[in-house]
Image: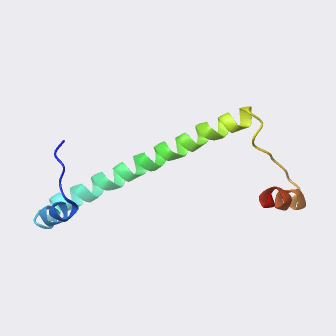
Amino acid sequence: MQSVKFNELIETIKSLSLEEKEEIKFLIERYLIEERREEIYKNYKESLKELEKGEIKFTGNIDKLKEMIEE
């Protein structure tokens, strides 16, 4: 894949039609949503591993929660 400098990319986008710009906006929004979804899934998998190892603690006691945060 050819590397394009950011400022060149911006200038290219500026020269596009309104419809093309809207399509790029739509695509970027979808790419960002997918990246965020992947990040959430990765964090979920890491949390499961921590839970299995006993590294995650839960409490409903506010005082205990404060202690856990301060650790």
Q: Is residue 66 left or right of residue 2?
A: right
Q: Quadrant of residue 29?
A: bottom left
Q: Name the residue located 75 percent from the left edge and 43 percent from the top edge.
A: 56
Up the image or down, 71 lies above or below 34; here it is: below
Q: Is residue 8 left or right of residue 24?
A: left
- For the C terminus, the image quarter is bottom right
Q: Residue furthest front?
A: 71
Q: Name the residue located 31 percent from the left edge and 54 percent from the top edge.
A: 28
- For the N terminus, the image quarter is top left
Q: How far across and how far down the image is residue 35, in percent? A: 42, 47
Please name whichever residue, 25 or 62, is drawn nearer the observer in this view of the structure: 62
Q: How far across and how far down the image is residue 49, in percent? A: 66, 34
Up the image or down, 1 lies above or below 60; here it is: above
Q: Quadrant of residue 5?
A: bottom left
Model colouring: rainbow
Q: How far across and how far down the image is residue 10, in percent? A: 19, 65
Please name whichever residue, 10 or 16, is drawn nearer the observer in this view of the structure: 10
Q: Name the residue located 19 percent from the left edge and 49 percent from the top edge.
A: 3
Q: How far across and how far down the image is residue 15, in percent? A: 10, 66
Q: Is residue 31 left or right of residue 39?
A: left
Up the image or down, 6 lies above or below 58; here it is: below
Q: Quadrant of residue 50?
A: top right
Q: How many marks?
A: 0
